[in-house]
């Protein structure tokens, strides 16, 4: 999320430290910073708000509150502390919620607004974070959203056709022309806003074009609502229409935020837009209940390995704006309505740790584990078998658990070709072997040798000897080579105590760098020549590789023998390009140059 430093400054009595210091403060106590960008006189931080905090921190107010706690600076101008009267009712607008996917809907009706360009400061605030200024009404709704985290939408009341506002699921195939001038076909799991049962907005995502705000708009209906996050996310994905509003609803914001958003809009109406507030309709079927979370000083210190006093913990809760009661080392905390993440004691412990700073908590050795750790037999056996086979030159493969035939049909089929769970590893291993044989030269292998450790679902009586148990999964190990067909047997048949002693303590394989091979075919060429006895084959290989250039992806010595004063060396060269198919002509030319170099060195090409 883009966050403006000049915008953040407005929450405090004095300017904040520079963006670099703010970046460090947030990184070490709250969220990572992807970067800081200079925009005119402003500095904009790109804050990576974690998913568990999307409900309260995807706003300037949320970030300001974090900085207030981290830097010990009072939040002097909190928009949530500003009073706003939503008690005035209007009978001209009605709201009907026909789905439990909308927890709250506030409609504010204002007449006589003056639509026009936004003031300079508002344009600068929005443009600094990458938003385009449209007009003072639309800009006001965007400002409130980025300021408080509550998305708003403004409808032209006269273009709605009806002031009977409804929230319902769309009818399958229902269409709506959105503000981006695209027509969307809706499904019956998409929540829509209606006026007289005609869709005028996709709930939490986008408003409709027919009721959009224009220069001639005079009366408006402001929507400040709360929609189900999962529904909004699925609809946004299905429609390929993700917006700043949907990004916030997807996080599951508090329905209490809807009132704060509407209060923020009232300020703009009074000072920037003008107009007369006719009243509000607030449909809130099940108001959010106040929650309480208890934690003790002992719990906090035990988990963090710290030695905090009650005063230390009280200081953190005060800085975070968490109301609490403390008695004999027990803190009962009342989370603010927007902090939906504070549910259990461990959530409060995390708050203490991050605000104090994990770097300030001394390292404490973990307590001695009194019991002998239990070894998972399947895992241990699989690891030992894996090490044994790798040591013997086999490569591990992972083949699909789905098969064209079998004992058990998959309920949610991946495709129509492989609708069953496999009953054997053999088919997959044979197919993998066949696929890898053409690449063995490129990989420098003399023989393809593969193994797989995986689960099968045998059930028939004839498969019971392999561990079949009425369709229950069985872990198997299977091997295959290009000379021998695949075979398999149950992994418990390889109990650790039957392993040869030399395999009991095999070292783990060392890490290697993965280099993808080209999708283009390769060309193999051999060159053999006589050299004086005692010639260093490594130096010769390096010379050939240098002459062959970057198109030679691999060179290996595959044959050598001596006769009198001479030694024959035979090298195999693999040529391959990452961007094209090589031709015989260009490879032959390279081989001619290599032969010329070898002859020049006094070697006799065979």
Image (cartoon, rainbow, N blue to C red):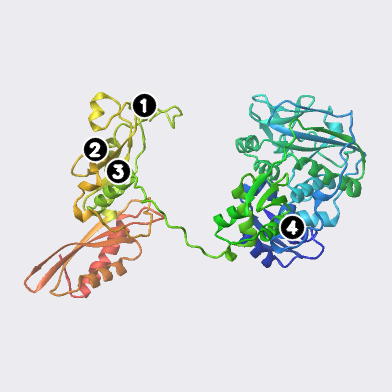
Q: On residue 452, which mark appears?
A: 3
User: Would residue 572 be found to the left or right of residue 238 on screen?
Assistant: left
Residue 251 in picture, x, y percent from top left: 65, 43
Identity of the residue drawn at 67% across and 61% down: 312
Q: Is residue 47 above or below residue 202?
A: below
Which residue is farthest front? 328
> Tag on residue 408?
1
Measure how far apart labels 4 and 3 are at the Cα level: 55 Å
With 567 as the anchor, is 264 left or right in this view?
Answer: right
Kindly tell me whether residue 509 is visible in this rendering: yes
Query: Could you classify mark 2 by the number of other residues whose Cα lies within 10 Å: few (under 14), some (14-19), or many (20 or more)?
Result: some
Which-is-in-front pick, marks 4 and 3? 3
- Label 3 and label 2: CA atoms lie apart by 11 Å
Q: Nearer the viewer, residue 465 or 216?
A: 465
Question: Label 4 belongs to which residue?
Answer: 128
Q: Nearer the viewer, mark 4 or mark 2?
A: 2
Mark 4 / mark 2, whichever is N-terminal: 4
Residue 343 screen position, x and y as percent: 63, 44
Question: Mark 4, residues whose alpha carbon is within 10 Å: few (<14), some, or many (≥20)?
Answer: many
Residue visible at 18% across and 44% down in the picture: 483
């Amino acid at each position: 999320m883009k966050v403006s430093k000049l915008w953040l400054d407005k929450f405090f009595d004095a300017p904040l430290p520079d963006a670099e210091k703010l970046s460090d403060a947030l990184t070490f106590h709250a969220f990572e910073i992807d970067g800081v960008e200079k925009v005119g006189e402003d500095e904009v931080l790109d804050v990576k708000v974690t998913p568990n905090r999307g409900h309260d921190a995807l706003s300037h107010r949320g970030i300001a509150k974090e900085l207030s706690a981290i830097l010990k600076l009072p939040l002097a101008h909190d928009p949530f502390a500003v009073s706003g009267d939503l008690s005035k009712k209007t009978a001209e607008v009605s709201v009907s919620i026909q789905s439990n996917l909308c927890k709250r809907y506030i409609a504010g009706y204002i007449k006589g607004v003056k639509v026009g360009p936004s003031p300079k400061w508002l344009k600068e605030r929005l443009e600094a974070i990458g938003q385009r200024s449209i007009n003072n009404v639309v800009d006001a709704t965007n400002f409130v959203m980025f300021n408080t985290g509550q998305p708003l939408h403004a409808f032209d009341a006269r273009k709605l056709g009806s002031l009977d506002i409804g929230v319902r699921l769309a009818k399958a195939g229902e269409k709506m022309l959105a503000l981006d001038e695209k027509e969307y076909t809706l499904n019956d799991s998409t929540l829509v806003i209606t006026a007289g049962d005609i869709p005028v907005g996709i709930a939490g995502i986008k408003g409709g074009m027919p009721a959009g705000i224009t220069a001639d708009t005079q009366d408006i209906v402001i929507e400040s609502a709360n929609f189900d996050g999962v529904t909004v996310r699925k609809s946004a994905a299905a429609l390929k229409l993700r917006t700043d509003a949907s990004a916030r609803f997807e996080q599951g914001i508090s329905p209490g935020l809807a009132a704060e958003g509407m209060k923020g809009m009232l300020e703009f109406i009074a000072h920037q837009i003008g107009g007369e507030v006719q009243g509000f309709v607030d449909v809130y079927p099940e108001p959010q209940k106040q929650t309480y979370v208890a934690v003790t000083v002992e719990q906090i210190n035990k988990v963090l390995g710290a030695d905090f006093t009650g005063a230390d913990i009280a200081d953190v809760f005060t800085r975070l704006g968490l109301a609490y009661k403390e008695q004999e080392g027990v803190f009962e905390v009342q989370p603010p309505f927007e902090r939906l993440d504070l549910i259990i004691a461990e959530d409060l412990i995390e708050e203490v740790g991050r605000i104090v700073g994990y770097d300030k908590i001394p390292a404490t050795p973990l307590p001695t584990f009194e019991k002998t750790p239990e070894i998972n037999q399947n895992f241990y056996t699989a690891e030992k078998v894996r090490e044994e086979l790798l040591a013997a030159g086999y490569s591990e493969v992972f083949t699909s658990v789905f098969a064209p035939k079998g004992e058990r049909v998959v309920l949610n089929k991946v495709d129509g070709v492989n609708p069953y769970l496999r009953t054997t590893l053999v088919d997959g291993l044979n197919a993998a072997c066949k696929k890898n044989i053409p690449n063995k030269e490129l990989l420098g292998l003399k023989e393809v040798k593969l193994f797989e450790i995986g689960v099968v679902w045998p059930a028939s009586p004839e498969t019971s000897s392999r561990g079949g148990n009425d369709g229950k999964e069985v872990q198997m190990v299977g091997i295959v080579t290009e000379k021998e067909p695949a075979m398999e047997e149950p992994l418990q048949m390889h109990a650790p105590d039957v392993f040869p002693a030399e395999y009991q303590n095999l070292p783990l394989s060392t890490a290697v760098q993965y280099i993808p091979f080209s999708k283009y075919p390769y060309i193999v060429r051999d060159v053999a020549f006589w050299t004086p006895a005692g010639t260093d084959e490594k130096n010769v290989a390096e010379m050939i590789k240098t002459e062959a250039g970057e198109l030679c992806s691999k060179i290996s010595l595959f044959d050598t023998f001596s006769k009198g004063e001479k030694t024959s060396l035979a090298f195999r060269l693999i040529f391959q390009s990452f961007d094209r198919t090589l031709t015989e002509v260009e490879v032959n030319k390279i081989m001619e140059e290599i032969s010329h170099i070898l002859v020049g060195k006094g070697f006799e090409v065979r």
